Image (tube, rainbow, N blue to C red):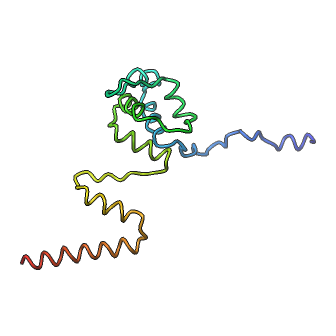
Amino acid sequence: MTREDQDMTAPATAPDPGTAEPPSRLGALSQLIQDALDTGESYQRLADRAIDPKTGETVSKPYLQQIVKTPPVNPPTLPRMGAIAAALGKPLRRVQEATAEQWLQYEATELAGYDEEVRIIVGHLAGKPKADVRRWRMMIEADERARREADE
């Protein structure tokens, strides 16, 4: 390599000044923990609070660090999720959703306030093509209109 070539090369890891930080590639549970760290929490303070209220199981500072930096192949167990929820001050359901999203690529949709029948219908329609969902919606809306008109 000539002197001229050396002057024109830059290390591959040199950051390009003026470029924004790349978007986070953290999984959903990793991001929940990172969000807590971003507010001033430390891994140690989180670990000190990480006690599952049902089983008493705890998670350690290294385990929390591992979830953020190099997530394990397997998701945390339910008691560990309970401990993480306690550490973060989040509902267990939120930690379960984040765990499912990170390890199973499954994003839950909350249907609070609806009965089991509605949940089953929504779950059934979730995998359908948009045209089928539109058709079902039109049928449901037509049924509602007919009921209203019958009541008038």
Indicate the quadrant where residue 80 lies. Answer: top left
Query: Who's the residue at 30% across and 72% down the image?
Result: 137
Residue 144, position in %: x, y? 18, 73
Q: Is residue 9 left or right of residue 41?
A: right
Residue 111, position in %: x, y? 29, 53
Q: Is residue 139 left or right of residue 47?
A: left
Query: Who's the residue at 47% across and 39% down the image?
Result: 31
Indicate the quadrant where residue 35 lies. Answer: top left
Indicate whether 29 appears above or below 46: below
Which quadrant holds the N terminus?
top right
Residue 19, position in %: x, y? 61, 46
Given residues 42 and 50, the one toward you in this image is: 50
Residue at the far left in the pictured view = 152
Indicate whether 24 appears above or below 114: above
Q: Is residue 139 left or right of residue 44?
A: left
Indicate whether 131 appears above or below 22: below
- Total numbered badges shown on the rendered structure: 0
Query: Who's the residue at 36% across and 71% down the image?
Result: 133
Which quadrant holds the C terminus?
bottom left
